[in-house]
Amino acid sequence: MKFTSTLIKGKLINRYKRFFVDVKANNQIITAHCPNTGSMMGLLNANNDVWVSKNDDPKRKLKFTLEMIKVKQKLIGVNTHRANKIVEHGLKNKLIDEFKDVKAIRTEFKFGHDTRFD
């Protein structure tokens, strides 16, 4: 899946206050927003490889967002805002064995007048 900006690789230091992670990247420590409010048990070991995106929007308090964590040689997408795009990419590129034969793929759509079917 392509991101709108280049991801920055770093090492997880720790997560705190549910929405913050400290990451060592490019010989500095940065604080990134953690969009996943779940416990993420098993993912938050110090020194795990992580990837963050950078956003230069002056309205943002934190310029970085946690995107992925590598655990046991697997990349785990932890940005819950990207879940639908990740699944869409997997389906369109036939990366999910159980759905390789699916021909019609549609993202969330209106069902009736004012309801999404998702």
Image (cartoon, rainbow, N blue to C red):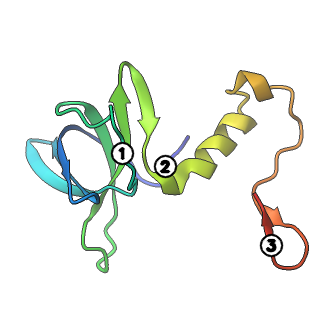
Q: Real-space Cα distance between discs 3 and 2? A: 29 Å
User: Image check: 5 left or right of 30?
Assistant: right
**What amino acid is found at the position of numbered circle 1 in the picture?**
Leu
Amino acid type of disc 2?
Phe
Q: Which of these two is toward me, 26 or 30? A: 30
Question: Between residues 8 and 98, which one lies in front from this camera angle?
Answer: 98
Q: In the rendering, at what x and y percent does residue 74 appear?
A: 43, 24
Q: Which residue is mark 2?
A: 3
| Residue at screen point 31% across, 68% down | 56
Q: CA distance from mark 3 to mark 1?
A: 35 Å
Name the element at disc 3.
Answer: loop
Secondary structure under tag 2 reads loop
Marked residue nearer the N-terminal end (3 or 2): 2
Q: Residue 55, labelled with which disc?
A: none
* Residue at horizontal 18 percent and vertical 56 percent from the top: 31
Residue 114 falls in image quadrant: bottom right
**Of the image marks 3 and 1, the number of the one nearer the N terminus:** 1
Query: Residue 43: x percent and y percent?
Result: 32, 34
Q: Are marks 2 and 1 in contact (CB under 8 Å)?
A: yes
Q: Quadrant of the N terminus?
A: top right
- Mark 3 lies on residue: 115
Residue 118: percent from left, percent from top: 75, 57
Task: Please name the amino acid that badge 3 sits on.
Answer: Thr
- The mark found on residue 7 in the picture is 1
